[in-house]
Image (spheres, rainbow, N blue to C red):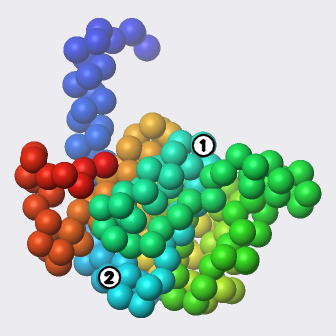
Amino acid sequence: MSTPSIPEFIDRYTGSMHALIDGVTASNANGPLAYVQAIEHAVELVRVAQAANRKVIMVGNGGSAGIASHQAVDYWKNGGVRAIAFNDASLLTCISNDLSFEEVFSAPLERFADPEDIVFAISSSGSSKNILNAADMARRAGCRLITFSGFTSDNPLRSKGDLNFHVASESYGLVEILHLFIIHTILDAKLQCFDGRDIFDRNRTFAG
C-alpha cells in the first residue's frame, strides 16, 4: 500500500466520517429502528428520567470513559439532568483491587442505581466484559439501558439495550467520535426541541 499524502488522507478520513454518520444503525428489542426514531426515543427517556428526578449513569473504558465523563457533565450542567460517570481513580483502583476489573462499573451500579435511571453503556468493541457486566447490572437494578457500540454488528452489547446505537467501523477513533456525536445529539435535541435552548447560537452561555 502506497503512503498517502496528507491531503489524500484527509479526504479519505473525512469521507469515512460522512459515510459512518449516514450509516449509524439503531435497534430496540423488536429489531431495527430508524436513527431518527431512536434519537426521539432516547430524548424521551432522558426527559422522563429528568421529570422523575432519576439519573443518567454513563460507563466506558479508555476513550469511552472520557466520553462518559464529558457527557455526564454536559447532561447535568447544560441539560439539568442528574448525571454521573464512575471514573474516580480511587473508585476504579479500589474495585479492581478488592473485587476485579470486570466489576468496576457493575459494583457501583449495584449500590447507586435506582429503578428507572438510565445507563449509557459505551464500548467501541461492544465486548468489554466490565461494560457487559454493567449492562446486566443495569437490567437487574430496573434501569433503562442505552448502548453505544462499534466494530462487528453482532457484538454482545448491541443486543442488551432498550435502545442500541451501532457504528460500523473497526477504527477506535472513528467509533469514539461518532459515539460522542450521538450522545451530544440526544442532549442537544432535548435542549433545542423541548427546553427552548438554541444550540446553534454562538453566544449561548451553557456550552460545554
Placement of 48 over or under 137, stated as above or below: below
Which amino acid is tagged 2?
Answer: Arg
Q: Dot 2, how many residues are within 10 Å of its Cα: few (below 14), some (14-19), or many (20+)?
A: some
Q: Which residue is labeled 2 in the image? A: 47
Q: Which residue is nearer to you in this view: 169 or 182?
A: 182
Which amino acid is tagged 1?
Answer: Gly
Q: Quadrant of residue 11?
A: top left
Secondary structure under tag 2 reads helix
Q: CA distance from mark 1 to mark 2?
A: 28 Å
Q: Is residue 130 left or right of residue 43?
A: right
Secondary structure under tag 1 reads loop
Which of the numbered marks, if any, corresponds to residue 152? Answer: none
Residue 56 in sight: yes
Q: Quadrant of residue 135?
A: bottom right
Query: Which quadrant, please, contains the N terminus?
Result: top left
Residue 165 % position (x, y): 41, 65
Q: Report if the CB atoms under discs 1 and 2 are less than 8 Å apart.
A: no
Q: Dot 1, how many residues are within 10 Å of its Cα: few (below 14), some (14-19), or many (20+)?
A: few
Q: Is residue 52 left or right of residue 134?
A: left
Tag 2 or tag 1, which sits nearer the N-term? 2
Q: Residue at x 23, y 35 (%)?
A: 15
Residue 26 % position (x, y): 37, 70
Q: Is residue 83 left or right of residue 140?
A: left
Q: Residue at x 44, y 50 (%)?
A: 70
Which of the numbered marks, if any, corresponds to residue 62? Answer: 1
Residue 85 % position (x, y): 56, 60
The residue lying furthest to the right in this view is 98
Placement of 149 over or under 30, stated as above or below: above
